[in-house]
Image: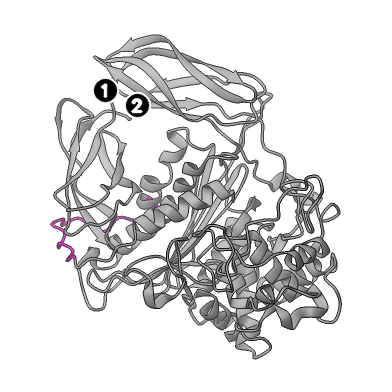
Amino acid sequence: MTRLHHRAFIRRKRIAAVTLAILLPVSARAAEPMSVGDIARAQARPLVTSGQTPGIAVAILEGDREPKFFAYGDATVAADGAPPRPFRADMLFEIGSNTKLFTTNLLGQRVAAGELRLGDPLSGFAAQLGQLKPATGRITLKELGDFTAGVANSAPLCGAPPTPGCMPSERPTIEAYGPGDMAAYFRAIVPLDFSVTPPEATRAPAPYLYSNFSVGMLGLLLGGAPDKPLGDGAVRGWFDAVQSDIFKPLAMRDTFLKIPARLADRRVSGYDRATALAQVTDGAITGVTLVNPGGDYLVAPQVAITGGNGSGATAVATLEGRAVGSIAVTAPGQGYLPPPQVVFTDGGSTITADAEAVIADGTIIGVRIRHGGAGYQRIPTVTVVGGLGPGGRAASATAHVSNGAVSYVSVDDPGAGYVEPLTVVIAPGKPVPAAAIPAWAPAGALSSTLEDMAKFARAAMRRPAPTVPALLLEGFRVAQTPYACQGTENPPSLKTCPAGATRSALAWMAAPRDRVNGVAPIFSKIGGLPGYWSAVAVMPKHGLGVVVFMNSRPADAAEAGETVDRVADNILYALFYERCDGGRPSAARRCAAPN
């Protein structure tokens, strides 16, 4: 995950975290709750049809039922014109920072077993780390895991003269930069506080600062020999412990640190795909605006303008380097309608929610939240404007709010006569190379399948099962306990954390309970590497879970992070509102799936 992405992501989570006393309305719908297939179709498939990603795959968990898998689009798009390979739930995917969830569960198990304490300071690991500065030595294992250690996301790149522990590249191999180099970096630093200038903290806990190095070091300490300096064997020791304590009891047979050569044909290819939006004036396409220029293009990609009830529009792309620099309209076409707009009014918000209607067969089958807004003091009115063909009937919908943000929009009347959404689809470029396995592998280097990650997500719901050791479930309990407040300008203490703000557990993000609106806590995590986005989100109280894999992620575009976590959030909230008493406020909701 890039620094740019993470700062924008935390900023969005912080803005949306305001708890207000809002009572949800009883839905007027008499229809049956949406099926999980309908939910996936409405919330995940549009990212493929609109050209945002070549493929997307989703696992949905409800109670003790077998997980259901849905996949749309392609896992690999061959540049030489060969047939694409469709996405499947058994394909191997680079999960990036979701690796951190395995590391913090491992720590949780050690704590639950009495082998370690969350308050153990780094000074107690002198044999592995060497002599630390006093402020760094006071950093605890908990602070490494909840991102309040004041440790930067990574070490700086080496300059002249090189600083201790500097890196030769942004993601060097273990051979080029090993655990011993990370230990040297820790010996050279003191905790940082980027909310002040100069950014030096007198001691931890410092304000929340996402860090691959902090959780990476946590994993190395768990995997390294306790009486020897950290070496390359610490990565192998960490992975061996994850295999024995998590993979084996959960029967996760397809999760790897390095994908075996025999399974190379099951690897999902990742892309940095360009995306764009079309402008319509008097039925003609008058311009195309790049949202993301993409990357890894060797030749200018093909551009297709579809939907909108029009015809005849064409456009061509021009490259700047290996990214799309511009798109020129070569024929404006005629008869085009812009997509319908979902408008939120009268909610008293400080930031208005943003959403899009999902259309199939002339009706609105769902509403995708792109941004939940912030500060809603009452339920906003939802109006769907435009996008109707002659004789069409407008749809109606109801908003639901949690922690001051719009969390879901249920469709009361799907309407009729909506035209297919106007979309600009840009062909993907060359697949990105596989990511190197770095010294901080415990923070972001595993590859897994959707099937395996569904097993992990079920265990993360902490539901007792005969085949799951109690210690593993206790590991999740420790890891999912909120310990700090997110937001670099917020004090880390939970006592002063703004009501409704996202909390930081051990790598997990914890959305607090909204007692007024009856929404249970949600624990989630996203993972990103160039070409790959993944998300895990669970609502343990109601036995609901979601895993999402998406094989397009810009190498350096912060706004793209809104995509995969929003898909997971949208599906999880859809399950909650559609399956748990239709979203009606209740002291104890009853979900359709067994609990």
- Badge 1 marks a residue whose secondary structure is loop
Closer to us: 116 or 329: 116
Q: Dots 2 and 1: beta carbons under 8 Å?
A: yes
Mark yes or no: residue 571 visible.
no
Residue 422's tag is: 2
Mark yes or no: residue 454 visible.
yes
Q: Amino acid at mark 1?
A: Leu
Q: Residue 395 falls in which quadrant of the image? A: top left
Q: Residue at x 75, y 64 (%)?
A: 188
Span highlighted in magenta in the image:
22-37
Q: Position of residue 370 (x, y in %)?
A: 36, 46
- Badge 2 marks a residue whose secondary structure is loop
Colour setting: one colour
Residue that label 1 marks: 337
| Residue furthest bottom in the image | 114
| Residue furthest front in the image | 198
Task: For label 1, count other residues whose C-alpha is less than 10 Å away and answer few (under 14), some (14-19) or many (20+).
Answer: many
Q: Position of residue 434 (x, y in %)?
A: 72, 44
Q: Residue 487 falls in which quadrant of the image? A: bottom left
Mark sitting earlier along the chain (2/1): 1
